[in-house]
Amino acid sequence: MKTLGIFILVVTLISIVLFYLKNKDMKKFMIALLLVGLIVVFSIMGSITRQILPLFIAHYILVLVSWGGWIGYMLKGRYYWWAIFSPTVTILLFLLLEFITGSRNEAI
């Protein structure tokens, strides 16, 4: 699974460079790199939601939606902010649930 993730990341970075060489748009190049970094951070932060399996699955579905938002930005030039930042919903929901219920493994 890690190999697939690294492969997808390398293909993504290569596609960003190819889009830059084709269009010579430095602003779009920098925004695309920033968005990919943000999506990778969301993917890594999603490991905290592993304790609640449905939330974990929903997080990774939203990470895929986020990649789709990035692809839409690269191909159409439209910035789908709601799609790119959608994984934050599951992270915030997990933090809220942990605040309300606690970690459940503390000694009484």
Image: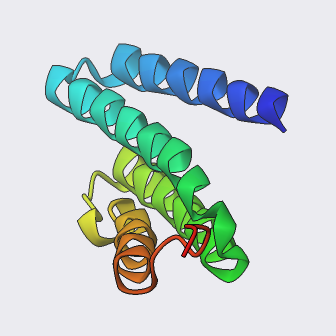
Answer with the quarter of the image where residue 8 lies. top right
Taking depth in this image into account, of 7 and 97 the one nearest to the observer is: 97
Left or right side of 88 for 39: right
Taking depth in this image into account, of 40 and 69 the one nearest to the observer is: 40
Find residue 103 and report its horizontal and vertical position in percent.
52, 70
Identity of the residue drawn at 39% across and 32% down: 37
Find residue 69 and report its horizontal and vertical position in percent.
42, 60
Left or right side of 77 for 94: right
Find residue 28 and report its horizontal and vertical position in percent.
23, 33
Taking depth in this image into account, of 22 and 33 the one nearest to the observer is: 33
Q: Quadrant of the C terminus?
A: bottom right
Most distant residue in the front direction: 108
Left or right side of 52 for 63: left
Identity of the residue drawn at 34% across and 28% down: 33
Taking depth in this image into account, of 105 and 72 the one nearest to the observer is: 105
Find residue 79 and report its horizontal and vertical position in percent.
25, 58
40 over 98 or under it: above or below: above
78 over 15 or under it: above or below: below
Q: Quadrant of the N terminus?
A: top right
The structure's colour scheme is rainbow
Answer with the quarter of the image where residue 97 lies. bottom left
Count of numbered labels shown in the rendering: 0
13 over 102 or under it: above or below: above
Identity of the residue drawn at 32% across and 62% down: 85
